[in-house]
Amino acid sequence: MGADRIASWGRHERPLIIAHRGASHDAVENTLAAFRVAREQGADGVELDVMRCATGEVIVFHDDELERLGKRAGNTRATSLAALREIDLGGGERIPLLDEVLEELGTMLVNVELKLAPTWWARALDDGLAASVAEILARHAAGERALVSSFDPWLLARFRRRARGIATGLLFAHDQSLPLRRAWSAPLLRPAALHPEAVLVDARAVADWHARGYALNVWTVDDPAELRLLAALGVDGVITNRPKFARSVLQS
């Protein structure tokens, strides 16, 4: 597993170790440093978050607002790239472009999460994120290395129309409405994978989802007992903040 076993997305006998926003336990999340550390720690791939900023570039950042990581007020999407680049996230790390992260990752697997807009009316509009990400992945010849996921079925559908050759994953969480947390849109979206929150996963769910042809990448898993249980249940990937630790647990 790790750098010695780079594989494509899909079904796996042993879970892929996917670094959540990079090795975010040991470096600032979604930074080039976090992705470098994930590679050094033997992750099979990384998960990252993308949105478009005010000047149109696709940036790698999780939050709608800049306060938590940037220590300043401001809406991320409403801020220009030049202004975003002025923010020191810690240790001199800056908000990277998706282009830059793909260059840094080399041959590693990459799960690109398309971030939901914060309001329903903004989500109803197409801000061009899906199309931009499709263009960037094509430019980097990401091919089987890439998987694009989202909590938003409509956003995922927009991406599929642009890049049918790239695998997609439907994200869902325990606090969503019943249709969303049961992934009722999956038969229409036809994703390669489902990405459930760990609390939604049990033996019955795994058997059902696998029987329907989906790979399962589960988030966010740092507890050793939970890692072992999910591996025993046969999930295909675990998304974790601590890739080195997760690797040691699953190999013990």
Image: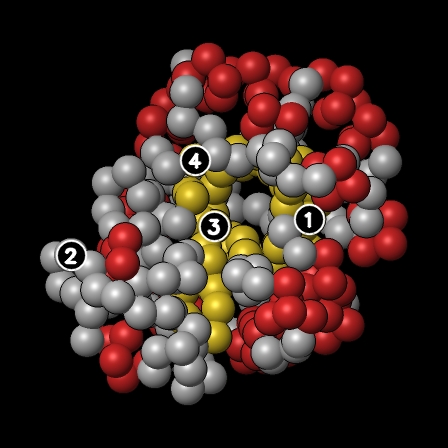
The residue drawn where x is 37% and y is 37% is 241
Location of residue 252 with respect to 27 vertically, above or below: above
Looking at the picture, how far across and down is residue 164, in whole percent? 76, 67
13, 205: nearer the viewer? 205
At label 4, counting other C-alpha atoms closer than 10 Å, the crowd grade (few under 14, some 14-19, many 20 or more) is many
Q: How much space separates mark 4 and mark 2, taking CA atoms?
A: 21 Å
Nearer the camera: disc 4 or disc 1 = 1
Label 2: element kind: loop
Q: How much space separates mark 4 and mark 1, taking CA atoms?
A: 17 Å
Q: What residue sits right under mark 1 in the picture?
A: 170
Q: What residue sits right under mark 3 in the picture?
A: 47
Looking at marks 2 and 1 on the same chain, the residue that comes earlier in the sequence is marked by 2
Snapshot quadrant of residue 197: top right
Q: What residue sits right under mark 2 in the picture?
A: 90
Residue 240, label in figure = 4
Q: What is the quadrant of the C terminus in the image?
A: top left
